[in-house]
Amino acid sequence: MKILLEGRRIFEYETDESTKYLIFSNESLKKYVYNAASIFIKKGDFSYPQKWLISEIFETRDLLTPINDFDSNIYEYMFHIDWPLVERITQILKPYGIQVAEEPNGVRMRDLNGLLRLEEIPQEVQHEIRGALAEEDIRTYEKFQVFECYSCKEKGNEEFFIINGDNDIILSDISYDQTDWFSDKYIVETYRKKTHPNTEYVFKTDRDEWFIYSPGDSDSNYWVLERIYDDELEDFSLSSYIKVETEKREIPEREEEIDFQRYFNKDTPYDFYYSDKMFALRILQDEGRFNMANINGKWERYTEMVLKDEEPFCKWNDMKYVGTGIFGDIKEEKLSQEEIMNFAVE
């Protein structure tokens, strides 16, 4: 597939139904900066909280700016709403009878809604609030995350895809660059079918894999590759496609297939790693489920396991080594709904 992918890249795309692969031309992929701040205040708007920009009211697309156009200096402050900031602003505005955070059923929330409702911040406390926001400004301690994105006009509307890559923040279901993996495959059979207004193809590889190759939009600006699994082949209507000649190529001998049984042997040793960020993401995505491993007789949480002495795949900046255990001594546990809610509030 190396020739098919020349000048292009292919990315893994997880959907509810299956895994697909999106193919974009190199020139169609651009870098965008993601404004991850909870609130950003343009210069001149500090005194008037109702003019402050709150990220949660924007679509994700609106928080992404082409890297060459991004200028954080147009903002006076950019910050996350953290508990220390909520507490500090609460104390500053308490003498004025202003309730800063919502308190449903007596439980203080992590928000600044009372401040955001003010038409103007009292002059007497502006200096203190400026000091509080300056200490929390994300530009002093956090790098802006850069995402590769695909953008194209399709019948007047923008088609926009965000590629997560190794970013800590998850913005889409498009993850890893699989170009090298697919470039190592060889197409040995090709079939095509005319579908108005485009043409769809079916490929068979030298590894007996089958894929549907079809345009992602009506103008074929990008393409989609989707696996046809063995249990689907019997019902797949290959007869509706016309077989076309495939250029013969010398296919190098493959290395021996990986022994997957080794991975699942109960005595196989694994190294276990843990990341708070990855754990938080998994808890919220997997309805409270998490994994534990028996490390030297003690059950420890882990977020990634790799064969002993191999490097972890994920690159979270808070990833730490937990220890070594065996495949047969791991288990899954689940937080209660109450524990999940408490975890989310924290």
Image: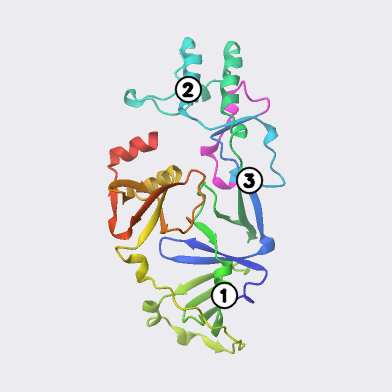
Residues tagged 3 and 1 counted as in contact (Cβ below 8 A):
no
User: Is residue 58 within the magenta segment?
Assistant: yes
Structural distance between the alpha carbons of marks 3 and 2: 30 Å
Earlier-in-chain disc, 1 versus 2: 2
Classify residue 69 as left or right of residue 170: right
Structural distance between the alpha carbons of marks 3 and 1: 32 Å
Q: Which residues are magenta?
A: 43-61
Q: Which residue is mark 1?
A: 184
Residue at figure coordinates x 53%, y 88% from the top left:
242
Looking at the rendered structure, the secondary structure element under dot 3 is strand
Q: Amino acid at mark 3?
A: Val
Q: Quadrant of the N terminus?
A: bottom right
Q: Which residue is mark 2?
A: 114
Instruction: Please tell me how crowded label 1 is: few (under 14), some (14-19), or many (20+) other residues with Cα within 10 Å.
Output: few
Residues tagged 3 and 2 counted as in contact (Cβ below 8 A):
no
Residue at figure coordinates x 52%, y 47% from the top left:
168
Classify residue 23 as left or right of residue 258: right
